[in-house]
Amino acid sequence: MTSSSFTSTGSGQPAATTTTGAFRNSTGGRSSFIDSSSHRLSMGSNRLSLLPTKNGLTTTPVLPTPQLDSEELSARTATFINEVNFSVQKIKTKIAENTEQWVQDTAEARELDRELREEMKVALEQEANLAKALKKEKEEANNMLKAIQQLSERNEEMQQIRSSLETQVAILRKEVKAKREAKIAQKKALDEQVLKNKPELASFESILAMRIVGVKGKFPIKDHIGFVFTRINELDWDQEYSITVDVSQHEFAVSDCTPNLPELPSLLRHLNDTRDFYGFLKRVRKAFKDLSKKQ
Protein backbone atom coordinates (compact mmCIF):
# COMPACT_ATOMS: atom_id res chain seq x y z
CA MET A 1 0.00 0.00 0.00
CA THR A 2 0.98 3.65 -0.43
CA SER A 3 0.65 6.36 2.25
CA SER A 4 1.01 10.07 1.53
CA SER A 5 1.57 13.01 3.97
CA PHE A 6 1.68 16.68 3.23
CA THR A 7 3.89 19.36 4.94
CA SER A 8 3.91 23.11 4.50
CA THR A 9 6.96 24.92 3.12
CA GLY A 10 8.13 28.33 4.05
CA SER A 11 6.28 29.97 1.19
CA GLY A 12 2.93 28.51 2.32
CA GLN A 13 2.75 25.86 -0.50
CA PRO A 14 2.14 22.23 0.51
CA ALA A 15 4.94 19.76 -0.01
CA ALA A 16 4.28 15.98 -0.46
CA THR A 17 6.20 13.12 1.07
CA THR A 18 5.32 9.77 -0.64
CA THR A 19 6.07 6.20 0.57
CA THR A 20 5.65 3.50 -2.06
CA GLY A 21 5.08 -0.22 -1.18
CA ALA A 22 5.47 -3.30 -3.25
CA PHE A 23 2.24 -2.90 -5.24
CA ARG A 24 2.36 -3.31 -8.97
CA ASN A 25 -0.24 -2.17 -11.49
CA SER A 26 -1.88 -5.28 -12.77
CA THR A 27 -4.40 -3.54 -15.05
CA GLY A 28 -1.84 -3.07 -17.80
CA GLY A 29 -3.49 -0.05 -19.39
CA ARG A 30 -3.94 2.47 -16.50
CA SER A 31 -1.22 4.59 -14.75
CA SER A 32 -1.05 4.43 -10.97
CA PHE A 33 -0.67 7.29 -8.56
CA ILE A 34 2.98 6.43 -7.99
CA ASP A 35 3.72 6.55 -11.72
CA SER A 36 2.04 10.00 -12.00
CA SER A 37 4.00 11.38 -9.02
CA SER A 38 7.26 10.04 -10.36
CA HIS A 39 6.53 11.65 -13.72
CA ARG A 40 5.85 15.03 -12.11
CA LEU A 41 9.02 14.84 -9.99
CA SER A 42 11.08 13.98 -13.01
CA MET A 43 9.75 17.01 -14.90
CA GLY A 44 10.54 19.28 -11.91
CA SER A 45 14.08 18.03 -11.81
CA ASN A 46 14.47 18.92 -15.46
CA ARG A 47 13.85 22.57 -14.48
CA LEU A 48 16.73 22.60 -11.98
CA SER A 49 19.12 25.42 -12.58
CA LEU A 50 22.39 26.47 -11.09
CA LEU A 51 21.83 29.85 -9.39
CA PRO A 52 24.92 32.17 -9.46
CA THR A 53 26.31 33.60 -6.28
CA LYS A 54 27.44 37.13 -5.70
CA ASN A 55 30.99 36.31 -6.61
CA GLY A 56 29.85 34.64 -9.82
CA LEU A 57 30.43 31.07 -8.56
CA THR A 58 27.84 28.40 -8.68
CA THR A 59 26.28 27.12 -5.47
CA THR A 60 24.41 23.97 -4.42
CA PRO A 61 21.29 23.55 -6.56
CA VAL A 62 17.93 24.04 -4.89
CA LEU A 63 14.97 21.85 -5.84
CA PRO A 64 11.88 23.66 -6.85
CA THR A 65 8.76 23.10 -4.83
CA PRO A 66 6.31 20.75 -6.71
CA GLN A 67 2.91 22.18 -7.36
CA LEU A 68 0.28 19.45 -6.59
CA ASP A 69 -3.48 19.54 -6.97
CA SER A 70 -5.02 18.38 -3.67
CA GLU A 71 -8.37 17.38 -5.15
CA GLU A 72 -6.81 15.51 -8.02
CA LEU A 73 -4.50 13.71 -5.62
CA SER A 74 -7.40 12.76 -3.36
CA ALA A 75 -9.38 11.47 -6.32
CA ARG A 76 -6.47 9.50 -7.61
CA THR A 77 -5.82 8.11 -4.12
CA ALA A 78 -9.45 7.11 -3.68
CA THR A 79 -9.45 5.47 -7.10
CA PHE A 80 -6.26 3.61 -6.27
CA ILE A 81 -7.60 2.48 -2.90
CA ASN A 82 -10.84 1.29 -4.53
CA GLU A 83 -8.88 -0.61 -7.13
CA VAL A 84 -6.68 -2.13 -4.43
CA ASN A 85 -9.70 -3.08 -2.33
CA PHE A 86 -11.41 -4.54 -5.38
CA SER A 87 -8.32 -6.54 -6.24
CA VAL A 88 -7.92 -7.69 -2.63
CA GLN A 89 -11.59 -8.68 -2.45
CA LYS A 90 -11.25 -10.51 -5.74
CA ILE A 91 -8.15 -12.29 -4.48
CA LYS A 92 -9.90 -13.15 -1.20
CA THR A 93 -12.89 -14.49 -3.11
CA LYS A 94 -10.60 -16.54 -5.32
CA ILE A 95 -8.67 -17.78 -2.29
CA ALA A 96 -11.95 -18.71 -0.56
CA GLU A 97 -13.13 -20.54 -3.66
CA ASN A 98 -9.78 -22.27 -4.04
CA THR A 99 -9.78 -23.12 -0.33
CA GLU A 100 -13.28 -24.58 -0.55
CA GLN A 101 -12.33 -26.52 -3.66
CA TRP A 102 -9.13 -27.68 -1.96
CA VAL A 103 -11.08 -28.82 1.12
CA GLN A 104 -13.56 -30.66 -1.12
CA ASP A 105 -10.78 -32.19 -3.22
CA THR A 106 -8.91 -33.14 -0.05
CA ALA A 107 -12.03 -34.80 1.42
CA GLU A 108 -12.62 -36.63 -1.85
CA ALA A 109 -8.97 -37.64 -1.99
CA ARG A 110 -9.13 -38.92 1.60
CA GLU A 111 -12.33 -40.82 0.85
CA LEU A 112 -10.78 -42.23 -2.31
CA ASP A 113 -7.66 -43.14 -0.34
CA ARG A 114 -9.80 -44.86 2.31
CA GLU A 115 -11.76 -46.75 -0.37
CA LEU A 116 -8.52 -47.73 -2.09
CA ARG A 117 -7.07 -48.94 1.20
CA GLU A 118 -10.22 -50.94 1.91
CA GLU A 119 -10.16 -52.39 -1.59
CA MET A 120 -6.46 -53.17 -1.21
CA LYS A 121 -7.15 -54.87 2.13
CA VAL A 122 -9.95 -56.94 0.55
CA ALA A 123 -7.70 -57.71 -2.43
CA LEU A 124 -4.89 -58.83 -0.10
CA GLU A 125 -7.30 -61.05 1.82
CA GLN A 126 -8.61 -62.49 -1.43
CA GLU A 127 -5.05 -63.01 -2.61
CA ALA A 128 -4.22 -64.82 0.64
CA ASN A 129 -7.36 -66.96 0.33
CA LEU A 130 -6.56 -67.71 -3.30
CA ALA A 131 -3.01 -68.64 -2.32
CA LYS A 132 -4.35 -71.01 0.36
CA ALA A 133 -6.85 -72.48 -2.10
CA LEU A 134 -4.14 -72.87 -4.72
CA LYS A 135 -1.86 -74.57 -2.20
CA LYS A 136 -4.68 -76.89 -1.17
CA GLU A 137 -5.49 -77.67 -4.79
CA LYS A 138 -1.82 -78.41 -5.46
CA GLU A 139 -1.72 -80.76 -2.46
CA GLU A 140 -4.93 -82.44 -3.64
CA ALA A 141 -3.49 -82.69 -7.16
CA ASN A 142 -0.31 -84.27 -5.78
CA ASN A 143 -2.37 -86.69 -3.71
CA MET A 144 -4.47 -87.53 -6.76
CA LEU A 145 -1.32 -88.11 -8.81
CA LYS A 146 0.04 -90.41 -6.11
CA ALA A 147 -3.31 -92.24 -5.93
CA ILE A 148 -3.38 -92.55 -9.73
CA GLN A 149 0.18 -93.86 -9.71
CA GLN A 150 -0.69 -96.40 -7.01
CA LEU A 151 -3.83 -97.42 -8.92
CA SER A 152 -1.78 -97.76 -12.10
CA GLU A 153 0.71 -99.98 -10.31
CA ARG A 154 -2.16 -101.95 -8.76
CA ASN A 155 -3.78 -102.22 -12.19
CA GLU A 156 -0.57 -103.61 -13.64
CA GLU A 157 -0.40 -106.14 -10.79
CA MET A 158 -4.05 -107.07 -11.34
CA GLN A 159 -3.42 -107.44 -15.07
CA GLN A 160 -0.55 -109.79 -14.32
CA ILE A 161 -2.71 -111.71 -11.82
CA ARG A 162 -5.55 -111.80 -14.33
CA SER A 163 -3.25 -113.09 -17.04
CA SER A 164 -1.95 -115.76 -14.66
CA LEU A 165 -5.49 -116.70 -13.60
CA GLU A 166 -6.65 -116.88 -17.21
CA THR A 167 -3.75 -119.22 -17.94
CA GLN A 168 -4.68 -121.34 -14.91
CA VAL A 169 -8.36 -121.31 -15.91
CA ALA A 170 -7.44 -122.42 -19.42
CA ILE A 171 -5.37 -125.26 -17.96
CA LEU A 172 -8.17 -126.22 -15.55
CA ARG A 173 -10.70 -126.14 -18.35
CA LYS A 174 -8.54 -128.52 -20.33
CA GLU A 175 -8.17 -130.76 -17.28
CA VAL A 176 -11.92 -130.62 -16.54
CA LYS A 177 -12.68 -131.33 -20.15
CA ALA A 178 -10.31 -134.28 -20.11
CA LYS A 179 -11.80 -135.57 -16.84
CA ARG A 180 -15.33 -135.06 -18.14
CA GLU A 181 -14.46 -136.99 -21.26
CA ALA A 182 -12.86 -139.69 -19.08
CA LYS A 183 -15.98 -139.80 -16.87
CA ILE A 184 -18.19 -140.05 -19.90
CA ALA A 185 -16.05 -142.85 -21.24
CA GLN A 186 -16.06 -144.56 -17.83
CA LYS A 187 -19.84 -144.20 -17.52
CA LYS A 188 -20.25 -145.58 -20.98
CA ALA A 189 -18.06 -148.53 -20.08
CA LEU A 190 -19.98 -149.03 -16.81
CA ASP A 191 -23.28 -148.86 -18.62
CA GLU A 192 -22.04 -151.46 -21.07
CA GLN A 193 -20.80 -153.59 -18.17
CA VAL A 194 -24.15 -153.21 -16.38
CA LEU A 195 -25.93 -154.44 -19.49
CA LYS A 196 -23.60 -157.40 -19.54
CA ASN A 197 -23.93 -158.04 -15.79
CA LYS A 198 -27.71 -157.74 -15.63
CA PRO A 199 -28.53 -161.30 -16.68
CA GLU A 200 -25.77 -162.69 -14.47
CA LEU A 201 -26.89 -160.50 -11.55
CA ALA A 202 -30.50 -161.58 -11.98
CA SER A 203 -29.43 -165.19 -11.97
CA PHE A 204 -27.16 -164.55 -8.97
CA GLU A 205 -29.99 -162.88 -7.02
CA SER A 206 -32.39 -165.66 -7.98
CA ILE A 207 -30.04 -168.40 -6.92
CA LEU A 208 -28.84 -166.74 -3.72
CA ALA A 209 -32.15 -164.98 -2.99
CA MET A 210 -30.10 -161.79 -2.48
CA ARG A 211 -30.17 -158.31 -3.99
CA ILE A 212 -27.72 -155.41 -3.91
CA VAL A 213 -29.16 -152.04 -2.91
CA GLY A 214 -27.81 -148.52 -2.59
CA VAL A 215 -27.43 -147.27 0.93
CA LYS A 216 -29.46 -144.12 1.55
CA GLY A 217 -29.85 -141.92 4.54
CA LYS A 218 -30.64 -138.26 4.42
CA PHE A 219 -28.16 -138.22 1.54
CA PRO A 220 -26.74 -141.14 -0.43
CA ILE A 221 -23.83 -142.74 1.47
CA LYS A 222 -20.80 -143.02 -0.75
CA ASP A 223 -18.75 -146.26 -0.94
CA HIS A 224 -21.30 -148.29 1.05
CA ILE A 225 -22.97 -151.38 -0.44
CA GLY A 226 -26.07 -152.96 1.01
CA PHE A 227 -26.96 -156.65 0.63
CA VAL A 228 -30.51 -157.91 1.36
CA PHE A 229 -31.12 -161.63 1.82
CA THR A 230 -34.51 -163.43 1.61
CA ARG A 231 -35.71 -167.06 1.74
CA ILE A 232 -33.80 -167.63 4.96
CA ASN A 233 -36.54 -168.06 7.52
CA GLU A 234 -38.48 -171.18 6.70
CA LEU A 235 -41.53 -169.77 8.44
CA ASP A 236 -41.39 -166.50 6.42
CA TRP A 237 -39.54 -166.68 3.11
CA ASP A 238 -40.05 -162.95 2.46
CA GLN A 239 -38.41 -161.83 5.70
CA GLU A 240 -35.34 -159.71 4.90
CA TYR A 241 -31.89 -159.96 6.48
CA SER A 242 -29.42 -157.20 5.53
CA ILE A 243 -25.79 -156.20 5.90
CA THR A 244 -24.05 -153.01 4.77
CA VAL A 245 -20.34 -153.14 3.87
CA ASP A 246 -18.07 -150.06 3.84
CA VAL A 247 -15.64 -150.36 0.92
CA SER A 248 -14.11 -146.86 1.17
CA GLN A 249 -10.90 -148.12 2.85
CA HIS A 250 -8.42 -150.85 2.01
CA GLU A 251 -9.87 -153.01 4.78
CA PHE A 252 -13.58 -153.74 4.59
CA ALA A 253 -15.88 -152.78 7.44
CA VAL A 254 -19.52 -153.42 8.31
CA SER A 255 -21.59 -150.32 9.10
CA ASP A 256 -24.91 -152.11 9.67
CA CYS A 257 -26.12 -155.67 10.18
CA THR A 258 -29.81 -156.57 10.73
CA PRO A 259 -30.24 -158.71 12.73
CA ASN A 260 -26.86 -158.66 14.45
CA LEU A 261 -24.60 -161.68 13.94
CA PRO A 262 -22.43 -162.80 16.88
CA GLU A 263 -19.78 -164.26 14.54
CA LEU A 264 -19.59 -161.09 12.37
CA PRO A 265 -16.10 -159.98 13.62
CA SER A 266 -14.53 -163.30 12.67
CA LEU A 267 -16.27 -163.25 9.28
CA LEU A 268 -14.94 -159.71 8.64
CA ARG A 269 -11.37 -160.71 9.61
CA HIS A 270 -11.51 -163.61 7.22
CA LEU A 271 -12.72 -161.31 4.43
CA ASN A 272 -9.85 -158.84 4.95
CA ASP A 273 -7.33 -161.67 5.11
CA THR A 274 -8.53 -163.54 2.00
CA ARG A 275 -10.23 -160.71 0.04
CA ASP A 276 -12.83 -163.35 -0.93
CA PHE A 277 -15.96 -161.23 -1.08
CA TYR A 278 -18.10 -163.93 -2.72
CA GLY A 279 -17.20 -166.41 0.02
CA PHE A 280 -17.95 -163.73 2.64
CA LEU A 281 -21.50 -163.31 1.32
CA LYS A 282 -22.04 -167.08 1.40
CA ARG A 283 -20.85 -167.27 5.03
CA VAL A 284 -23.06 -164.29 6.03
CA ARG A 285 -26.11 -165.99 4.50
CA LYS A 286 -25.30 -169.22 6.31
CA ALA A 287 -24.89 -167.27 9.59
CA PHE A 288 -28.30 -165.58 9.07
CA LYS A 289 -29.87 -169.00 8.41
CA ASP A 290 -28.34 -170.51 11.52
CA LEU A 291 -29.57 -167.49 13.53
CA SER A 292 -33.13 -167.89 12.20
CA LYS A 293 -33.19 -171.53 13.28
CA LYS A 294 -32.20 -170.56 16.80
CA GLN A 295 -34.97 -167.99 17.08
Image (tube, rainbow, N blue to C red):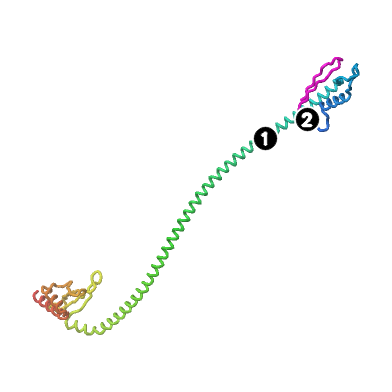
Magenta segment range? Answer: 1-26
Estimate the x, y position of residue 288 in percent, counting from the top left. Answer: 12, 76
> Please, what secondary structure does the residue beneath circle 1 have?
helix
Instruction: Quadrant for residue 270, please give it.
Output: bottom left
Determine if the magenta segment contains residue 19: yes
Instruction: Quadrant for residue 188, please give it.
Output: bottom left
Which amino acid type corresponds to the residue marked 2 in the rendered image? Arg
Which amino acid type corresponds to the residue marked 1 in the rendered image? Trp
Q: Residue at x 79, y 28 (%)?
A: 83
Visible residue check, residue 65: no
Residue under label 2 = 24
Visible residue check, residue 124: yes
Q: Is residue 132 left or right of residue 266?
A: right
The vertical placement of 161 against 131, above or below, is below
Tell us which disc is closer to us: 2 or 1. Answer: 2
Compare residues 56 and 211 and report the one nearer the observer.
Answer: 56
Estimate the x, y position of residue 14 in percent, counting from the top left. Answer: 84, 17
Compare residues 281 and 206 and report the one nearer the observer.
Answer: 281
Q: CA distance from mark 2 to mark 1?
A: 28 Å
Estimate the x, y position of residue 85 in percent, counting from the top left. Answer: 76, 27
The vertical placement of 208 against 62, above or below, is below
Q: Quadrant of the N terminus?
A: top right
Q: Residues within 10 Å of mark 2 (few under 14, many from 20)?
A: few
